[in-house]
Image (cartoon, helix red, strand yellow):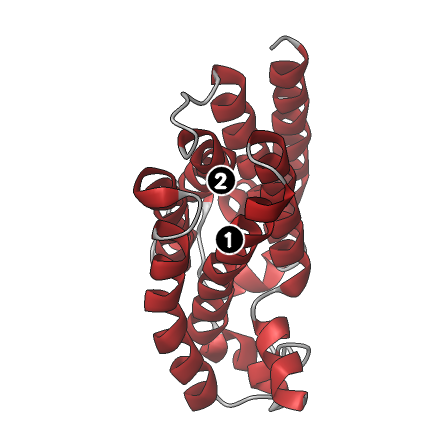
Amino acid sequence: MKKLKGLLKAAHFGPTLIVTSISFAFAVYYWWEGPAYVIAFGVFTGQLIVGWSNDLYDLEDDLKHQRTKKPLVSGLITKQYLQKWLRFMVPFSFVANLLGPLGIKGGSVYMLGIACGVAYNFYFKFSILSPLPYAIAFAALPSSVVISKDLNPPLWMLIGGALFGMAAHFINVIKDMDQDQASGIKGLPQRLGKTKSIAAAAILIALGVTALLIS
């Protein structure tokens, strides 16, 4: 039970649960409740990959800043244990998504979003283009469900997803911004600072809501 708790915490369980719930809602709308559970499970496995790879990559920085709420820092689980589960989950998630209701096309779109999340962890976090992976991943999530039904994602879905994704990036970074800046992490929010990042998030959310309302 202790290790399970550590795995869930390392996956950033709150955001993972939100993303999984969103995927379930879209799957119920475009499919029905039965396949929706399978789709949500596949999405959940992909989010585990993003969260676990993030905690593994950030371990040294988390130790530096004594982020004791992180399971690797607190000793709830070990680095080797998390690496073992990540090596299992990567191929498992591909199989679960590509061979599930999303199919090859929808599953590939969703896994593109997961690839963007991992790319953010290892590269884009330090780049002025840090919002880009969030934009692609948040647009890919609902689009993968639509594409699985051989339909074209509506423009509002792509634009709204991208805007809300970028807003989520700015909001997520704010709490650790001072420590990130001290560690030399120079994503776009860190370059702008807290005040401008809050303003950017608010503008992006407003634009996202507008895109939904005028659709």
| Amino acid, disc 1 | Val
- 181 to the left or right of 92: right
**Mark 2 to mark 1: distance in Å?**
8 Å
**In percent of the image, x 52 and y 35: which residue is there?**
142
Q: Is residue 171 above or below residue 10?
A: above
Q: Which mark is residue 167?
A: none
Mark 1 secondary-structure assignment = helix
User: Picture quarter containing residue 208?
Assistant: top right
In the picture of the structure, the residue carrying the numbered disc 2 is: 141
- 2 and 1 marks in contact (CB < 8 Å): yes
Name the element at disc 2: helix
Q: Quadrant of residue 75?
A: bottom right
Question: Where does the image place residue 74, in percent across and percent down from the top left?
Answer: 64, 87
Q: Type of residue at label 2?
A: Leu
84 vs 179, left or right, is: left
Q: Residue at x 64, y 43 (%)?
A: 33
